[in-house]
Every structure is written in structure tokens, then in C-alpha cells.
Image (tube, rainbow, N blue to C red):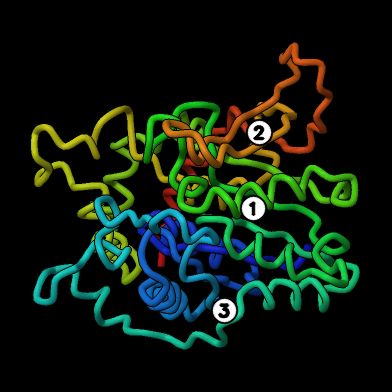
């Protein structure tokens, strides 16, 4: 029997894709909400909408967590420019995408996501827990700080983190969004996870770099999202929320960078795919990860030690940094998104 599963999400458009993949592919025991792509209230609404849309599959516990980053010295960031102000594409009433509005809000069970993760670990017995983080690491950092009985250290078997980069940023030149949104939390997490006490827990990072190098080809993306053979409520939902982030070919402006490159970069869907299919990792490196907190140009950068530094320091390399995945398998999984 597999481990219990928790997904921590900031519920933007690509999170919705990821949650549908997860809810269809495996039992999800806990969905934790964290502010990131949009504010926490919208995250809660968006997670509940996806769960309600997938109500035939299962009903995991939903817990709301951090509504702001740990540090008060820096303003919170959101990603409305990509995901829409509400996090799910700002679908307008009266448009063909109104199905998203008809989904309505579901129930959020409580407001203590860090505590919910600790409780899930406590109740997991010999099964243990796997955690997938799709947003800022604030909830995990708070749970680590509160873990006085070492429930996380004893029961977390594997953590999949969507975040970071090896120098190529997206929200800044050097920082990836999820880490930049709360660098202090990310620093707490990577520092703890590199300590000997956490050695039994395997940490796998699906970075911005591997997401960019593993796009869903536009032909596959459009046939899945905008031109399915048989439209379903899920495909209508996905088409509605995707119009802003991944514009359909017939409506995109000629200079719209969101349709650039070889395909759609859907980071969170890739992270969940890897969590469900770890054998789809074709190449990875063992690294040590630190997070820059103070750099004028580099705040939020994940600084990696591949073992090539000549500074004389021996840093524990406890993180599996994914560099190549089985793109064909990922695309096959992606094509199942809109199925009924």
C-alpha cells in the first residue's frame, strides 16, 4: 500500500492541471493551501472548485495555511499577470467558459495547514507521507518549526518540490517564483532537509530549468485543452481557465510570449506527474541547496553545490535535482487531463 499523499498548492492555472492529474491518478489525503499565485482566499476557492469538479474521484481534506510570506521586510508577490487576479484566468460571466463559475465553491475544512500536515504524518503509521509542494514553501517551513515531536522527520518519506533554478529565473533574472515568493521559508526548508536527522526523507526538486526543457508541444496542448475529440466538463473548465495563461492560437496577439518556444511550460503538472511516476526521471544530480536572502539582484536564488566548488567546504548533497524526464510519458499523461 502506498504512502499517504499531501499536496501543498497556491492554486494557479497550472496547479489546477496538477490537481486534476493527482486526483485522477492517486488517492490524495490532504490538500494544503498557501498564498502565492493569488491571495489565500482565492487559493481556497480555486482548490475547492477543482475538488468539486472532480467530485466523482474523491474528497480529500482541504486545509488553509499561510496568507503571507514569513518575512515582513519584503512585500508579498502574486502572479496575476500570468494566472489572472483570481488565480484561475479571470473567467468572465456570460462567456463560453462560464462552466468554471458554475462549479462554485466547495468546503475548506480548517485553517491550519502546517498542523494538518503534522497530523497526517502522526496518523500515517507505517505508511508514511509523501508531500508535493507546488507553491511557496511557507506552510512546510512553519510545520518544520512546529514539529516538536519530530512527526515530519519520522514520517515524511519523500518530498517533491516544484521550485528553484540553477541560475535561470522567471520572476527575476536569477530567481524562480515559488522560492522568490518566500525565500526565508525556502531557506528554512532546505537547511532542515540537509541535516542528518532528515536523511531518511528523499527530497526531489523539479526546477524551472527542467520545466522549460520539458514543454508540452503546442499541437498536443491545443488538442488536449482547446480541441478535445469529445468535450467534457473538465475540458471546458481547462479551456476556460487557460485562455489567459496559454492563449488559444486563434486569439493570441502576434507578439504574445506566452505561446513562445516549443510548447506549453506547465510546471506544476510536471511536478505531480513526477511524483506519481518517479521512474520517469531519466537524469538527476545530487546537490546541496542554499537560498540567497539578501542579494540585490539575487534574492530568492537557489545556489547549488554540485561538488565542483574549490572553497574547501564539504556540504551535504541530500537533494535530487532533476535534469531530464521522460517527455513522451509526460505528454501521454497530459493528454488524459480532459478525459471524462
* x, y percent for residue 168: 45, 28
Q: Secondary structure at mark 3?
A: strand
Mark 2 is surrounded, within 10 Å at the Cα level, by few (under 14), some (14 to 19) or many (20 or more) other residues, namely: many
* x, y percent for residue 6: 65, 66
Q: Which residue is mark 1?
A: 276
Q: Image check: 93 left or right of 299?
A: left
* x, y percent for residue 254: 9, 33
Mark 1 is surrounded, within 10 Å at the Cα level, by few (under 14), some (14 to 19) or many (20 or more) other residues, namely: some
Tell me, yes or no, whether the two marked residues, 2 and 3, touch with CB atoms within 8 Å. Answer: no
* x, y percent for residue 267: 46, 45
Q: How many marks?
A: 3
Mark 3 is surrounded, within 10 Å at the Cα level, by few (under 14), some (14 to 19) or many (20 or more) other residues, namely: many
Residue 124 marker: none
Q: Quadrant of residue 282?
A: top right
The CA distance from mark 1 to mark 3 is 22 Å
Q: Residue at x 55, y 73 (%)?
A: 65
Q: Which residue is mark 3?
A: 63
- Check the image and report above or below for 227 versus 105: above
Amino acid at each position: 500500500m502506498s504512502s499517504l499523499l499531501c499536496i501543498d498548492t497556491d492554486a494557479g492555472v497550472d496547479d489546477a492541471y496538477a490537481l486534476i492529474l493527482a486526483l485522477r491518478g492517486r488517492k490524495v489525503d490532504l490538500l494544503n493551501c498557501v498564498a502565492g499565485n493569488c491571495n489565500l482566499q482565492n487559493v481556497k476557492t480555486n482548490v475547492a472548485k477543482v475538488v468539486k469538479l472532480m467530485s466523482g474521484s474523491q474528497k480529500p481534506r482541504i486545509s488553509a495555511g499561510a496568507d503571507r510570506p514569513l518575512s515582513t521586510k519584503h512585500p508579498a508577490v502574486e502572479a496575476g499577470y500570468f494566472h489572472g487576479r483570481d488565480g484561475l484566468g479571470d473567467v468572465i460571466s456570460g462567456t463560453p467558459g462560464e462552466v468554471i463559475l458554475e462549479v462554485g465553491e466547495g468546503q475548506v475544512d480548517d485553517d491550519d495547514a502546517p498542523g494538518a500536515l503534522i497530523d497526517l504524518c502522526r496518523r500515517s503509521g507505517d505508511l508514511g507521507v509523501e508531500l508535493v509542494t507546488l507553491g511557496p514553501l511557507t506552510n512546510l517551513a512553519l510545520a518544520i518549526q512546529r514539529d516538536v515531536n519530530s512527526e515530519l522527520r519520522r514520517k515524511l518519506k519523500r518530498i517533491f518540490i516544484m521550485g528553484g533554478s540553477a541560475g535561470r529565473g522567471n520572476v527575476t533574472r536569477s530567481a524562480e517564483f515559488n522560492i522568490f515568493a518566500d525565500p526565508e521559508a525556502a531557506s528554512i526548508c532546505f537547511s532542515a532537509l540537509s541535516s542528518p536527522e532528515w536523511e531518511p526523507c528523499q527530497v526531489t526538486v523539479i526546477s524551472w530549468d527542467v520545466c522549460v526543457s520539458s514543454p508540452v508541444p503546442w499541437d498536443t496542448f491545443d488538442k488536449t485543452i482547446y480541441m478535445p475529440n469529445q468535450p467534457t466538463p473538465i475540458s471546458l473548465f481547462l479551456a476556460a481557465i487557460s485562455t489567459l495563461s496559454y492563449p488559444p492560437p486563434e486569439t493570441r496577439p502576434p507578439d504574445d510570449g506566452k505561446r513562445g518556444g516549443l510548447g506549453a511550460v506547465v510546471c506544476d503538472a510536471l511536478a505531480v506527474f513526477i511524483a506519481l511516476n518517479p521512474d520517469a526521471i531519466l537524469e538527476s544530480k545530487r546537490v546541496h541547496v542554499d537560498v540567497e536572502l539578501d542579494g540585490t539582484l539575487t534574492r530568492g536564488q537557489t545556489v547549488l553545490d554540485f561538488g565542483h566548488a574549490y572553497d574547501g567546504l564539504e556540504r551535504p548533497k541530500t537533494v535530487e535535482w532533476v535534469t531530464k524526464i521522460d517527455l513522451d510519458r509526460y505528454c501521454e499523461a497530459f493528454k488524459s487531463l480532459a478525459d471524462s
